[in-house]
Amino acid sequence: PVQFSKFFDHIDLGAHGIAGLTGLDGIVRARGGSGSEKIGDDVSGSQAFRHLRVASEGSYVSDGKFDGTARVFSYATIPDYPLYVAVGIGIDDVLAAPHRDRWTLFGIGGILTTIIISLTWFLAREEKRRHAAELTGRRRAEEERDLNRDFLDSVIESVPATIFVKNVRDHRYILINRAAEKLWGVSRADVIGKTPYDLFRKETADFITLSDNKLAQSGA
């Protein structure tokens, strides 16, 4: 909003001119020139909104309801964004200008066209930057996750203690390390996906399952 407001401030709108970028929800996102509206104000009850319901772009003469200054307005929605731009030139400024018909027809329209082109380019650029940043952040997170996983796998495989992981619901083994393979005298391919009842005698499997259930219930 601040960048857009600075952009509007560099446009010559005359003594009573106003330019604004507003969401289709009625909230002012950026503004420049004179006028009483501020960023964050709700202008959904304005004439611009009544005209937006009829057409996505056009012109009208305001009644000066918000700040007491009547203006000639042109407005248009921003393609692919829930925003519209409105540019208003004070009636007194229009009438005071030489060649007022040309100013009214071409001056406001030219300003509006310039703003829309600039805003569309800026919004597209920011969207591309944001997308690139998201991709970069996601890629870094994935790389860090893979590094952490590789490190954890290396630690699990290297420690001399027996390590195994089971699914708490069905008690099937989903991971064992090299030390467990040596202790049990089996390969992990023969263990992964099986329950204690597939690998041990019933008495032993009963004891292992009971211990697992107690451990799960304790929340450890």
Image: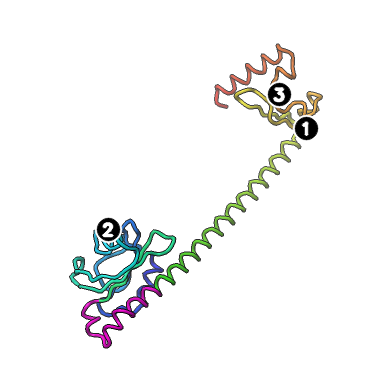
**Which residue in the protein does label 2 denote?**
44
- Closer mark to the observer between disc 3 and disc 1: 3
**Which residue in the protein does label 1 denote?**
178
Q: Residue furthest top?
A: 203
The secondary element bearing badge 1 is classed as helix
Find residue 134 and report its horizontal and vertical position in percent: 55, 55
How crowded pointer 2 is (Cα within 10 Å; few <14, some 14-19, many 20+) is rated as some
Q: Amino acid at mark 3?
A: Lys
How far apart marks 2 and 1 lie (CA) works out to 68 Å
- Closer mark to the observer between disc 2 and disc 1: 2
Q: Please report the residue visible at 28 percent of the width from the left and 73 percent of the height from the top.
A: 88
How far apart marks 3 and 2 lie (CA) works out to 64 Å
The answer to which quarter of the image holds residue 35 is bottom left
Find residue 192 and report its horizontal and vertical position in percent: 72, 28
Where is 35 relative to 49, above or below?
below
Where is 210 relative to 182, above or below?
above
- Closer mark to the observer between disc 3 and disc 2: 2
Residue 96 included in the magenta stretch of the image: yes
**Which residue in the protein does label 3 denote?**
194
Which mark is first along the chain, 2 or 3? 2
Which mark is first along the chain, 1 or 2? 2
The residue range painted magenta reads 90-113
The secondary element bearing badge 2 is classed as loop
The secondary element bearing badge 3 is classed as loop
